[in-house]
Image: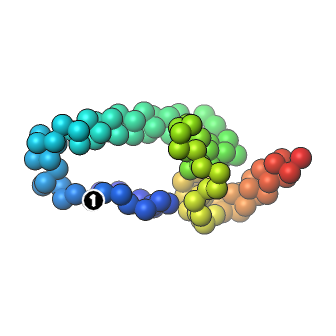
C-alpha cells in the first residue's frame, strides 16, 4: 500500500497470513511485535508534528539523529548509514539541494 526505502538491512520477513498464528502461539514474539507497533505509532505522531511545525533544517537534523539511533543510548552508532541526498530529501520533505546545503552547514558547525 505504501512505498518505503530501507536504510538498514531487513531482519525478519514473515508472510502476512502466517503472522496471526505466530502472534498467538509465541508470547515473546507477540510482546516484541506489540512494543514495536506502539513505538512505531509514537514515532509516526512525532513525524507528523515535526512536518507541520518545524523547518526543513530541523527536520533533517531530527532525521539524522533518528538514523544515528540517538534516542537509544545502548544502540547509538557513531557513523550514519549511507543515505543518498535524494533519499534524505524524500524523508525530510525537501529538495536534494537543500539537504546538501544543510549538510554542509552542519559540517561547518561540527568543525568549530
Figure coloring: rainbow
* Residue 96 visible in the snapshot: yes
Q: Is 16 displayed left or right of 47 in the figure?
A: left
> Which residue is rendered at x = 83% and y = 47% of the image?
109
> Which residue is rendered at x = 50% and y = 60% of the image?
7
> Which residue is rendered at x = 13% and y = 54% of the image?
18
* Residue 63 visible in the snapshot: no
Q: Nearer the viewer, residue 61 or 93?
A: 61
Q: How many marks?
A: 1
Q: Is 73 displayed left or right of 109 in the figure?
A: left
> Which residue is rendered at x = 10% and y = 47% of the image?
21
Q: Is 103 displayed left or right of 43 in the figure?
A: right
Rendering quarter of residue 17: bottom left
Q: Quadrant of the N terminus?
A: bottom left
Q: As drawn, which residue projects farthest toward the front?
A: 74
Q: Nearer the viewer, residue 101 or 19?
A: 19
What residue sits right under mark 1 in the picture?
Answer: 13
Number of residues whose C-alpha sits closer than 10 Å to that of mark 1, classed few (under 14), some (14–19) or many (20 or more)? few
* Residue 43 at x, y percent in the picture: 46, 37
* Residue 112 at x, y percent in the picture: 89, 47
* Residue 27 at x, y percent in the picture: 18, 37
Q: Is 14 displayed left or right of 101 in the figure?
A: left
Q: As drawn, which residue projects farthest toward the right?
A: 112
* Residue 67 at x, y percent in the picture: 56, 50
Label 1 SS? loop
Amino acid at each position: 500500500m505504501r512505498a518505503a526505502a530501507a536504510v538498514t538491512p531487513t531482519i525478519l520477513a514473515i508472510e502476512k497470513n502466517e503472522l496471526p498464528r505466530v502472534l498467538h502461539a509465541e508470547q515473546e514474539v507477540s510482546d516484541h511485535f506489540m512494543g514495536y507497533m506502539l513505538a512505531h505509532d509514537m514515532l509516526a505522531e512525532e513525524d507528523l508534528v515535526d512536518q507541520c511545525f518545524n523547518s526543513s533544517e530541523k527536520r533533517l537534523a531530527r532525521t539524522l539523529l533518528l538514523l544515528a539511533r540517538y534516542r537509544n543510548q545502548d544502540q547509538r552508532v557513531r557513523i550514519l548509514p549511507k543515505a543518498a541526498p535524494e533519499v534524505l530529501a524524500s524523508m525530510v520533505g525537501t529538495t536534494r539541494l537543500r539537504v546538501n546545503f544543510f549538510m554542509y552547514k552542519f559540517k561547518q558547525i561540527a568543525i568549530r
